[in-house]
Amino acid sequence: MAGKLERTGTPGIFRRHRKECDRKGRCDCPYVVPRPTMQTFATFAEAREGKAAAERRAKLAKGHAAGLHRDAPRDECPECERERVERERAEPTLHEYAREWVERYQGTGRRGFREETRDEWRRLLERFALRYFGEDVRLSDITPRDIADYIGWLVKQPSRRGGTLSDSSVHNACKPLFACLATARREGLIDHNPASGATLPHRPRVQDDEERARPFPRVEIGGETVETMELVVSLVHPDYRLLFELLAATGVRRSELLAFEGRHLDLDGDRPYVKVRQRVRRRRGEGLVIGPLKSRHARRDLPIPLDLADRLRALRTAPTRSCSPRRPAPSSTPTTSTSGSSRRRARRPGSSGPASTPSATR
């Protein structure tokens, strides 16, 4: 049975002699430091070091309880270490959170979040942000300095056209990361958003005073002024020529042109027009589908010439033709043809020149 504690020459260090110890000469009975927790040591030197370490830990714990380590955690503080371990268990890494966040993000505006934007942001995260930040980097570990270094790294990245990324490409690469950190801040995973107030690059470029050449300028042929657009439309296959005349008259985007339906044509009255209400977009795994416009500003009514309206009206009343220049086949998800198929069909039979497509007349 262990004996009682006996004081030594050092306060706070005791010795516990065994019952059979005669206390004569040197013995191998252990030394004990009872506070703050009971600790046993084989030698007096170990007991003295253990007592100093215990007092240091108690002092750090007292300072932690007083809030002295809130801004700068101490390495030897047991409470700081415990909080660090709990935080690492609770907080996800940037890689884990970003991949989960991009699949459920719904935007912050009334327009919501489009699926093609989700695909683009997923690609940008994998290409830039998740390649720059390591897999073990946690959300709370990212600082404003890390964001600034990330922007500096983006500026030096090569572009697909040669050179480095442009300012707009850098801005686009930062958007998904900044939105991800802002969401983490709203959800309480981080105390502050390190991307708040980040400065994006703005590098001035040399401005050219000369006017850009028109894609379809007027040319002089045989002393007469000819519209190049009319020449392009004349090369189109007759079955698709009306489609290209509508494109030339309205100047709509290719995605909007391919989504036109008969209900979008208002051909009555002396001021006929077409209504832009939807567009074609690419969805991963499904190809091209018909969906809403990109923004409310894209919703518009465009006037068309009277002769073009007459031909469209005749097409609507024809029994064997659709009233829409390009009507997608009915399905659960509206789809349309790809640009490659329209390019092949729009080529004039027997023509060896380039095909006239909606993209060529933009």
Image (cartoon, helix red, strand yellow):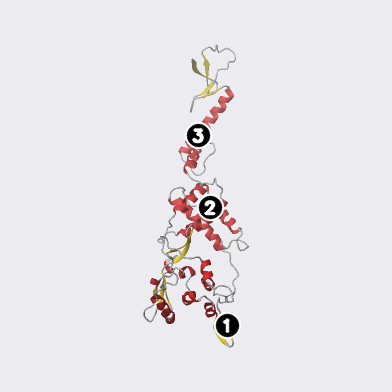
For residue 85, say whether it is visible: yes
Q: Of callouts 2 and 3, which one flags the residue occurring earlier in the amino acid sequence?
A: 3
Q: Amino acid at mark 1?
A: Val
Percent coordinates x, y for residue 171 in the rendering: 53, 60
- For mark 1, give the secondary structure: strand
Gap between marks 2 and 3, in whole Å?
33 Å
- State the image coordinates of residue 79 (x, y, percent, origin top left): 48, 37
Q: Position of residue 334 (x, y in %)?
A: 43, 63
Q: Which residue is under mark 3?
A: 59
Q: Is 126 placed above or below 37 here?
A: below
What residue is disc 1 on?
219
Q: CA distance from mark 3 to mark 1?
A: 89 Å
Q: Identify the element where label 2 is drawn.
A: helix
SS category of the residue bearing label 3:
helix
As drawn, which residue projects farthest toward the bottom? 223
Q: Nearer the viewer, residue 45 or 237?
A: 237
Mark 1: few/some/many CA within 10 Å (<14, 14-19, 20+): few
Instruction: Determine which quarter of the picture holds residue 276.
Output: bottom left
* Foreground label between 2 and 3: 2
Q: Are marks 3 and 1 in contact (CB under 8 Å)?
A: no
Which mark sits nearer the N-terminus, 2 or 1? 2
Q: Position of residue 128 (x, y in %)?
A: 56, 55
**Looking at the image, is mark 2 or mark 1 nearer the viewer?**
1
What residue type is disc 2 on? Pro
Few, some or many residues within 10 Å of mark 2 (<14, 14–19, 20+)? some
Q: Is residue 29 above or below residue 126?
A: above
Q: Amino acid at mark 3?
A: Lys
Q: Which mark is residue 144?
A: 2
Q: Earlier in the sequence, mark 3 or mark 1?
A: 3
Q: Nearer the viewer, residue 202 or 305?
A: 305
Q: Are marks 2 and 1 in contact (CB under 8 Å)?
A: no
Pick whichever, 165 or 127, lies toward us.
127
